[in-house]
Image (cartoon, grey):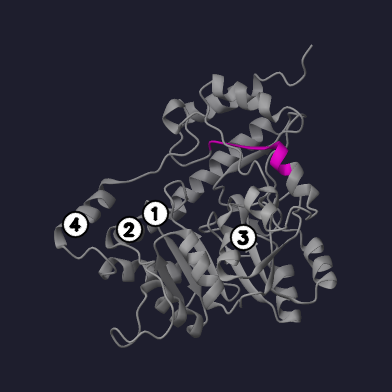
Amino acid sequence: MHTTSQYAVPIAQPEITDEEKRRVIEVLASGRLVAGRWVGEFEERFAAYVGAAHAVATSSGTAALMVAVEAAGIAPGARVITTPFSFGATANALLHRGARPLFVDIDPRTYNLDPDAVAAALDRAPDVRGLLLVHLYGLPCRMDAFEAMANARGLVLLEDAAQAHGAAFRGRRVGAAGAAGIFSLYPTKNLMTGEGGLLVTNDDAVADTARLLVNCRSRTPYIYEILGYNFRMTEMAGALGATQLTHLEARNARRREHARRLTAALADLDWLVVPYEPPGCLHVYHQYTLRVPRVRDRLIEHLNAHGVGNRVYYPVPIHRTPLYMREGYGTARCPEAERAAREVVSIPVHPGLDDAALDRVIRAIRSFVPHRS
């Protein structure tokens, strides 16, 4: 496997400004290293950014998912519809709670949950208690359809927006539509703190419970009210996140411009499919993902040879991984997710690319010969 440093054009390249470095050094010098001023400021700024009443900082996106599932009231044993085509933490958060994922297939154009397939699954399984959506690769789900389903059936609606900082559906940023939404702050994300996560919500009770779960504490010191965790964000991460947030819109704009250039240069190739951005959706291109039927693996070899970073997100649908096979999910029928896993590959789109790097990516792809003579 190639590492990022082995590529002339890496698949990801975290951007850290001198100002961000200075903030972190200031925190280290202060001696206040956990859950101080900067974490609180980051929470307030991010809540305002996505249009939520509350944001709760966590140690990772996975921690935020686990807290969101519990704080939103998903009970052990409850069935929750989610996608098989995502990072495993999405479904794992349900298993950690003792809930049962119900995997439903994806839309082949967006790679997000297919609203029609979800509606059909709800008709077949009226005991479902929640929907856990994923805004994959930075593209918003069809929130109008999913909110209508949740409202009509009294379902808990959760958003995994780990890859979708700043993405919007019909002008409203993702994350704050349902009971809770989460974001990851992993180094490759559009907004990053090294490690970290955020839970956002408009529900005061969900926010209160989330804070108790994250801090393993209670309103009165050492008087424990619920079984919590230690999922706190460090003050260094808070300082980095609060400062990075001021650059998020500009960095997302660069991602979108890079995606526009890639699409303009590659859309005429009949052996691949460029990303689709439906009307009303603002895609923030955490990943620029091509669909390459039949010759995906050969293209990957070609890109490696030309120094162009690439990654398959995700090569095996969650329900086909060993853990979920053992848990009895191997019989789930999700043919579009399985086909996508065989055909997708992501290429560089991050804001650190310059014109020369983009041109190198484009030349490498256009020089690939898909049909052997």
Task: Describe the element under mark 3 as helix, strand or loop.
Answer: helix
For the point 67% across and 24% down, the residue is 298
* Element assignment for label 4: helix
Q: How far apart are marks 3 and 4 (CA)?
A: 36 Å
Q: Residue at x 56, y 77 (%)?
A: 72
In the rendering, at what x and y percent does residue 369 appear?
Answer: 71, 18
Q: How far apart are marks 3 and 2 (CA)?
A: 26 Å
The amino acid type, in three-letter code, at marker 4 is Leu
Give the distance between the C-alpha atoms of the residues marked 1 and 4, in whole angstroms: 17 Å
Q: Name the residue under label 3.
A: 91
Identify the image quadrant of residue 4. top left
The residues colored magenta run: 340-348
Q: Nearer the viewer, mark 3 or mark 4?
A: 3
Circle 2 is placed at which residue position? 237
- Tell me: residue 69, above or below residue 204: above
Q: Is residue 57 magenta?
A: no
Label 2 environment density (alpha carbons within 10 Å; few <14, some 14–19, many ≥20)? many
Front label number (1 vs 3): 3
Q: Which residue of the protein is positioned furthest toward the front in this rendering? A: 326
- Kindly indicate the quadrant of the structure image that contains residue 45: bottom left
- Quadrant position of the C terminus in the picture: top right
How much space separates mark 4 and mark 2, taking CA atoms? 11 Å
Q: Which of marks 2 and 1 is nearer the N terminus?
A: 1
Look at the image and tell me whether residue 174 can be seen.
no
Q: Which of marks 4 and 2 is nearer the N terminus?
A: 4
Which circle marks residue 195 in the picture? 1
Q: Does the magenta stretch include residue 341?
A: yes
Residues packed near mark 3 inside 10 Å, few (<14), some (14 to 19) or many (20 plus): many
Q: How far apart are marks 1 and 3 (CA)?
A: 20 Å
**Which residue is nearer to you in this view: 225 or 248?**
225
Cβ–Cβ below 8 Å for labels 2 and 1?
yes
In the image, is 305 to the left or to the right of 121? left
